[in-house]
Image: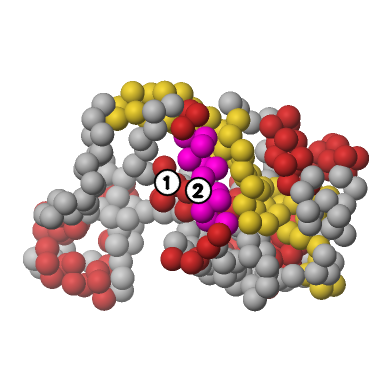
Amino acid sequence: MKAIACELPRVHGLPLSRFSRAELHRLVIERGISEASASTIARWLAEDALKPWQHRSWIFPTDPAFLEKAGPVLDLYQGRFEGKLLHPGEFVVCADEKPSIQARLRIHEPLPPSPGSRGQRVEHTYQRRGALTYLAALDIGRRGGRRPRVFGRSEPKGGIEPFDRLVWQVMTKEPYASARRVFWIVDNGSSHRGQKAVERLQRRWPNLVLVHLPVHASWLNQLEIYFSIVQRKLLEPNDFDNLAELARTLNAFERHWNQIAEPFTWNFTRHDLATLIERLTAHEPSTAAPSSPTELPAGSTKAAAAMPDRSSRQRPGGFVSVSRRPGGW
């Protein structure tokens, strides 16, 4: 029974993407494998925490230097860079963008919670009032010391110029303007990709150090945690008259969060990533291996690691121990 639950339905000729309890029960009865009831089968599956009706998304990065590229970011979260402790006058900033945030005007105003209602009631039908891109930069702070601080801005769309305006918004303010170094952790988006972006930003801001995450590593960007908070606390349910109201509310939320936020508890280290890569090597598809041998850092392997998908901005699936609700969030 458990062996069947650990197989895909198509192995048994069924036009299903995954088993439900009812489908699994029907299969074993029709094929004379077992006469157990559906509730008994559910109990057997629960013994090994088998839930074939659930699924998770994964990405197998093809970058053989994933650990080498992600390691410096994890070191920065631990207050180190290139083997040395960060100076108190050095800062770590995570930046990213959240595109296509819609302003949706409900045709009837949401109703507040009332006795017996279980919560708000939100009209399903809405009018689209446009969409914007929200760019943000998070100074991660230091536990036991400096509070985190987020800077954000709303733009019609992303790109080099909007991102550079975000950088200007941060780097013209103290303590960043006169800091020894300000490390900016970013992904490989077109507005800050590659060596050209490094050179462009360092010409304008000599104390800015751009640190790129590897591809498929957004789950290692602490700003994604803040975006998750914004999504849960502000954008769901979505009810805004227009884009101007949406932008003002995003800025008001930043000010509110900055007053009460505490640094995220980030326990995932370079060593943990190396261990994860080793553990997941066996799941690598044959097509993901590099065509030629590549030297990797110690503790790594030539196989690419399986990493969580970016399809939903949720907690990193157990790979990172983070506090999602600092200060009551």
Q: Position of residue 92 (x, y in %)?
A: 73, 59
Q: Does dot 2 land on a helix, a strand or a loop?
A: helix
Identify the mark nearer the N-term, 2 or 1.
1
**Which quadrant is home to the N terminus?**
bottom left
Q: Position of residue 317 (x, y in %)?
A: 47, 61
**Within-10-Å neighbours for mark 2: few <14, some 14–19, many 20+:** some
Query: For this view, does 200 lie left or right of residue 111?
Result: right
Q: Decide which of 184, 219 is in the foreground and name it.
A: 184
Residue 221 lies in quadrant: bottom right
Q: Residue at x 55, y 59 (%)?
A: 259
Q: Position of residue 310 (x, y in %)?
A: 52, 47
Which disc, if any, is residue 261?
A: none
Q: Residue at x 23, y 46 (%)?
A: 112
Residue 211 seen by the camera: no
- Is 257 part of what is drawn in magenta? yes
Residue 223 seen by the camera: yes
Above-or-below relation of 45 to 109: below
Q: Does dot 1 land on a helix, a strand or a loop?
A: helix
Confirm or deny contact between disc 2 and disc 1 (CB under 8 A).
yes
Q: Decide which of 98, 288 is in the foreground and name it.
A: 98
Query: For this view, does 83 lie left or right of residue 133?
Result: right
Q: Residue at x 73, y 29 (%)?
A: 161
The dominant secondary structure in magenta is helix
Q: Which residue is mark 1?
A: 234
**Which quadrant is home to the C terminus?**
bottom left
Which amino acid type is shown beneath numbered disc 2?
Answer: Phe
**Within-10-Å neighbours for mark 1: few <14, some 14–19, many 20+:** some
Q: Which residue is mark 2?
A: 253
- Is 96 part of what is drawn in magenta? no
Q: Position of residue 20 (x, y in %)?
A: 22, 54
